Image: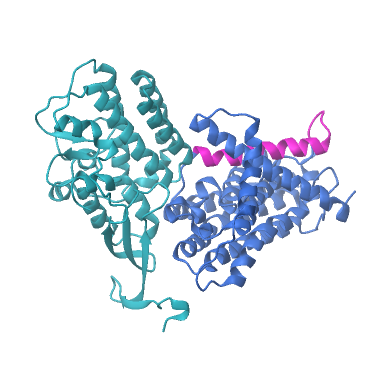
Chain colours: A blue, B cyan
Amino acid sequence: MSGVTAIPVLLIGLAVLVWFAASLSSVFGAMLAGRPVGLTELAVPGRGALRLLLKERSSTPMPDALLWRLGVVLVFTVPVLAAVVIPLAPGVAVADLPVGIVWWTALMALLWVGVFMVGWGPNSAYPMVGGYRFIAQALAYEMPLAIVVITVGLLAGSLRVSDIVAGQEGGLWYALWAPAAFFVYLMSATAQAFWGPFATPIASDLAGGVRAELGGVDRLVFTVGRYAALVVAAAFAVPLFLGGHHGPLLPGWLWIIVKTLLVLALLVSARWIWPRLRLDRFEEFAWVVLIPLTLVQLFVVGAIVLLRG
Amino acid sequence: MQPGGLPLAARAEDRDGLPLDVLYVPLGPVLSAWPAGLTLQLTLQGDVIQDLQVDTRHFAAKDSVRAFWNVPWHRALAGDEVPVAEAARHRAAAHLDSLARFLYVAGDEGGALIAARLRDEALAGQTADRLLQQVATLERRLVRGRLLDRVTRGVGRIEPQRAVEIELSGPALRASNGGGGRPRPATALGEGDARSRWHQWLAETKQALQQAADGGSATMSTKGRFEGPRGVLGQHTAPSRALLGAICETLVGQELAVARLIVASFDPDVAELDEAGEG
């Protein structure tokens, strides 16, 4: 199974993981609020989705309707398209492109455009400030993320995702070859999905930011898109850093699922652990600490690759 | 020209004397984790606040309704015998309520949920010892990694001298290193910024809970000054009036991004203005 036949598997997998992420987030919230936690948390995302589907779509005076609706669709489609290069089982991916990691990076960068359009469209102050915030945030995380992805490509000597997985067969995972890169990847991936400490464009201090004027089905598509971005970022960490399907005893596809769930749980929990970062201060940290750190990591990895021959 | 009935942005000189579009954006009266009924009419240029007007008419009570958080002290002012422990518990709950709102605005959803739960438990009669333990756990969470400190440091600073001039009282004054009465707890920083204010709330919550634990059956004396959760009550102006003054002073020149954080760090109570016959 490969190519077109893997598309349904990818879509169903994404949907289940989005559901899992939303339920898990609701479980963490219930634990902190001291509510009893049960299997009913699994119904929370469904209930929220149903409520949004029944609600009227909202609009504003003089919106840029085309860009606004297009932005919402973009926030949803970009992560799904980026996911086509992710291996679903040993040797199975929708498209194992020779430039796989470049495809993923380029697609996810389109999230900027989508989120900014959602902020720009409604002709309203808070969404607009939220949209600008995301551009500023991208300025902070995108450079370190790009360097990290290059680091992994350098280790494997290839931009093809299946080659990167093969490069970790029987050896150390790239998370151990390049721990700083792995850490920066997780941080940037959270920022890319504007999740948790990086939820600045949809922040509570902006009355909801870019999604302040979204109602009904638009809000649902936007929210699902955001979860999908988080899921795809977690899933992509598995082939890049955690050895893909490699692991003892269990079959490869199960290893991929287990590793993806663990990374996803880690990212989801960040929301309930840390306060939101202030962008002006994170910007400084990104350029003064993260970029030099990732560059040093890149040089160290380069030296390792040269020495190994 | 008014396309779609919306006036186009007018221009005015900004702080550097450059002509820039002026935008009028209201904050409130209804936002999550916002002092209910408060409206700030902001005048923005870019995302910098150039001017603001306070408006508290929206939710003005028809009859004189007592602000919920001040109830024990008003009863004492009216001559009732109020147990010290009961008032202390109410004070702790009020500070936890302010803290929950502040944490929500600062984006610490988990901390906000914990603070709100502790507030409810304090009002529902959970033992003071148990509450003290849980507040200590919350404190460890908030100081962990010093992230919240970094986010709130230097935000909305009121100098000690100025704090006295604008008649701040209560925790906000002590967070600016002024005002005696109550000994300043060790963890509070007294720098007059948002960081000092949330540390102050936390410290005074613990202090009040300790008082509630030790309280016994003593009642509050019916003479002297009464300090509610937000400041001295029974004066000609409500403590929240001074807090609004502090907000007006600190907001001008700030970016929209920190406006909510500053307001939440003072946390005025509009109901308090109503009861003082203002608003």
Looking at the picture, tell me which residue is in the foreground, A272 or A233: A272
Looking at the picture, tell me which residue is in the foreground, A100 or A2: A2
Residue A240 location, x and y as percent?
A: 71, 46
Rendered image quadrant of residue B108: top left
Q: Main secondary structure of the magenta part?
A: helix
Q: Which residues are magenta?
A: A247-273
- As drawn, which residue projects farthest toward the right? A1
Q: Residue B223 in magenta?
A: no
Q: How many marks?
A: 0
Q: Is residue A158 visible?
A: no
Looking at the picture, tell me which residue is in the foreground, B226 or B171: B226
Residue B76 location, x and y as percent?
A: 17, 29
Residue B67 location, x and y as percent?
A: 26, 40
Q: Is residue A197 visible?
A: yes
Q: Is residue A244 above or below residue A145?
A: above
Residue A72 location, x and y as percent?
A: 62, 62
Left or right of B217, for residue A305: right
- As drawn, which residue projects farthest toward the top? B216
Left or right of B279, for residue A117: right
Left or right of B54, for residue B27: right
Residue at image position (74%, 53%) is A83
Rendered image quadrant of residue A108: bottom right
